[in-house]
Amino acid sequence: MEVKSLDRAPGAPEPSPLELDERALALQERARGFAERVLMPLEEEAERRGGRLPDDVVAAVKREAIEAGLNGGLHAREHGGQGWTLLEWALVEEQYGRTTNAIHWHVPNAYNVWTHASAEQIDRYLRPALRGELKDAYAVTERDAGSDPSAITASADRTDSGFRLNAEKWFVTAGDVAAVYVVMANVVDGSERLPTLFVVDRDRPGVEIVSNPAYTHNYPEGHPTIRFRDVELSEQDVIGGVGGGDELQRSWFTEERLGIAARCGGAMWRLLDETVAWARRREQGGSRIYDHQGVSFPLADSAADAAAGRLLTLTVASLADSQADPKVVHHKASMAKLFTSEAAWRCADRCVQAFGGRGYLRSNVAERLLRELRVDRIWEGTSEIQRLIVARGLERRGVERILH
C-alpha cells in the first residue's frame, strides 16, 4: 500500500495529536506572534535594566496585548476578559514560557479569585485590571507559613463595623506595584478560625511595605514583605464569603501550577531551539559539537522531557475543562508542575553547558532561563510539596485515576 506524504511546507510543525479546534489554533498562533514580535526583542534591554522597562515601553506592551486579544484570558467576556478554556490559556502560557524576564507580566490580567467577587468589586478592581489600569497582588505566604497554608497566623478579628486585619505577608509578587491586595487571613469567630480572602487597598491606613529584597531573576515586579497592622475592613471587602478561603486557594494553586507547567514547557522549547541551532554550527576539532554524543544526547533527553511534559500539561488542562473531579485535577496539576519544573531546570543546565563560556553570558537566553527557572521548583509549592500531593493522590484516588 502506498503511503502518500502530506503537503506541508518545509520546517512546518507536525499536526498536533491533541484535538485543537480552529479557535485554539488561531489563539496559539496569535500568542506566538506576540511573544516573538513584541516580547523577545525586549529581553536583553529588560535584563540590562534589572527587569524594569521604561513606562512608554510598558504601555506599548499593554496596548499590543489588548489589540491581540490576550488580556484577561480566563476571565469572562462580560468582565472585560476573553473567556478562554484552560486548554487555550495553557497554549498561551506556553508561548510566554518561551520568553525571558517575565515581560508578559505586563499583559493586563488579574487573579482567578475575582471570579467570586461581588459586582461592586468586579467594577472597582477587575475591569480596570483587565484594561491595564491597575495591578493586583495575592498575599498568602508568611514567615512560618509557606507550602503549608494551614500554618497561616494572619487574623481578622470581628468588629462592630466588620473586621480588623493583622498580618505580615512574604513574597507578595507584584506587591510593590499593586493597587490592591488579596489577603488570606483567618477570621476569628469565637473558637473558630475561618480561612477567608479579603480585598485590601494599598492606600488603606496600616498597610506598609517593610522589605523589598532583590532576587535571582530580573523581573518587572518585586516580591516584597507587606505588613497589615490593624487594617479596618468591612463585610464588603470579603471575596467568596467568610470561611471560603481554602476552596478558593485550592483553585488558585491548581491554576498557578498549570501555568508554571505550561511555561516550563515553553522554556524547554526555546532552550532546545537555541541550543540545537548553536551546536549544529559550532565546530571544534574539525567537527560539529552536535556530532558529539556528550552534547546531543543530553539534548535528546530534554526533548523527550519537553514532549512528555507538554502532553501531560495540556491533558490536565483539558481534564479541568471537562469538569472532572477538582481533587483529581489538583493532584494531576501538581504532577505536571513537578515534572516540568524539574525537567526544565535540567534542560537549562544542559544547554548552558553546550554553549560553553557563551552560556555564562547574560545576553544568552540559556543563562537567563537557568536563573529564572530555578524558582519554578519553589514557588506555588516546592517540588517536595508536589510530591506529597501526588503521593496522597495515589493513596486516596487510586493509581489508575492519577495516571490515566
Image: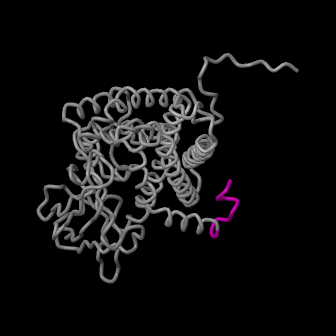
Residue projecting furthest to the front: 285
Q: Is residue 144 above or below residue 345?
A: below
Q: Is residue 244 above or below residue 29?
A: below
Q: Position of residue 228 (x, y in %)?
A: 19, 66
- Taking the spot 53% from the left edge, 38% from the top edge, the residue there is 272
Q: Is 397 in the magenta? A: yes
Residue 15 can be seen in this image? yes
Q: Position of residue 171 (x, y in %)?
A: 30, 60
Q: Main secondary structure of the magenta part?
A: helix
Q: Is residue 92 above or below residue 198?
A: above
Q: Is residue 267 above or below residue 239?
A: above
Residue 318 can be seen in this image? no
State left or right for residue 93 relative to residue 21: left
- Taking the spot 64% from the left edge, 18% from the top edge, the residue there is 8
Rendering quarter of residue 225: bottom left
The region drawn magenta spans 395-404
State left or right for residue 346 relative to residue 161: right
